[in-house]
Image (cartoon, rainbow, N blue to C red):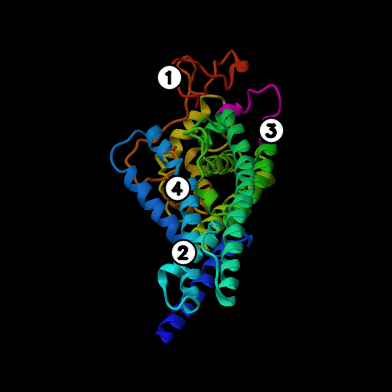
Amino acid sequence: MSVVVWVCFAAGTLCLLATWASVIGSLIVPRALHSTLSGITAGATSLLFGLATKGKLSYERRDRILAWQSPMSLLVRLIVWVALFDLAFTLMLMPFVDGDIWRAASEAGSAMFTLGYAAPTNLGNTILVYAAAYTGLVVVALQIGYLPTLYAAFNKREEDVTLLVSRAGSPSWGPEILVRTRFGRASQDSTNELAELYQHWERWAAAVAESHSAYLTLVWFRSPAPYSNWLISLLSVMDAAALQLSLSPSTAPNTRARLVLRMGFTCLNQVARAVRIPVEEDVDPDAPLEITFDDFEAAVELLKTVDYPVEVTAEQAWPHFRGWRANYEKVAYALAYSIDAPPAKWSGTRRFEFEPIVPFRPKNRTASGVRPDDPQMLGRRSRTPGNADR
């Protein structure tokens, strides 16, 4: 019996150390440490929500269900941590309660949940009971302190995603940014306006790269609006920059467009590595894209309807656009698949069947979203009963 109880003590010690490593790595260390325990709980939660959204559901209903996934994974992870700490202290108490597992469990549970109904009787279990009580308080306190940091990063991310809706539509789409900016029709120089947009999103991408690779739960946190999404928004800005560089090389804000593309795919690669999605380090710029030339040509024709200054033909621009997009298309599509992002145009496949959703435009607008003779109407929405504000 004495050997068995000390084996239990050793097993409990290992369980305690492994659980503390998971807690510290997940809540304190500001980088992705790939906690096995956190990965298992997140994977199990993802599997359950995958089953809950299996079948033919509208995207709005699917989004409402998936909005619970990340918060639920945090709760499940906390419950598993507490349960493992309780198990660890139960096993460690075995030598000090004469091998009585029910008494050990009673003392560990009483201390972990600060109930205080089972008093220790000797020095050994007194020390362990106090350690268990301290552990229970610290783990809950760390989780509570973790949430404000998490939601501060989430709110900062979503502010710019929401601001982009008037520029890129909802769900966002790269060509729509150029269309709505109405390059060549605006009363002011749209080149400077787009340069400022690219500069802002370069910084946004850098912030997201750091926050989402350190706090992996943020990757799956969904926007309040069903058709808004951090990944789709970044992808649309990058596509707009790639389109502008390939179609209007002499008038595009060259430096800003290149920098937002560089920071954009750096962000996607960093987040993908953090969630263990394979990343191709040296991308072939001539690699084939999932977007076809016909898709690209249709976008060019759309831009021409608002007098966008297309300086080259679609055939001439395509190799340049393909060269830029090859850097980020594959990893963006893999992330979009993983997080069940809104099925926007040019955003890849999903685990559910869908038709690509074009950015919402009121019925009494042209393809550009405005009347040609009324630029002040840009971005305004029609309000009808049951019409989502997309």
Q: CA distance from mark 1 to mark 4?
A: 27 Å
The earlier-in-sequence mark between 3 and 2 is 2
User: Label 3 belongs to which residue?
Assistant: 193
- Whether 240 is drawn above or below 124: the answer is above
Q: Residues within 10 Å of mark 2 (few under 14, many from 20)?
A: some
| Residue stretch rendered in magenta on the structure | 180-194
Q: CA distance from mark 3 to mark 4?
A: 31 Å
Please tell me which residue lies in front, 230 or 319. Answer: 230
Label ID, residue 106: 2
Label 3 vs label 1, nearer the camera? 1
The total of numbered circles placed on residues is: 4
Amino acid carrying mark 4 in the image: Ile
Residue 7: which quarter of the image? bottom left
Name the side, left or right, on which 366 lies relative to 61: right
User: Label 1 belongs to which residue?
Assistant: 386
The earlier-in-sequence mark between 1 and 2 is 2
The earlier-in-sequence mark between 4 and 2 is 2
Tell me, yes or no, whether the two marked residues, 1 and 2, touch with CB atoms within 8 Å.
Answer: no
Amino acid carrying mark 2 in the image: Ser
Q: At numbered mark 3, what does the secondary structure look like: helix, strand or loop? A: helix
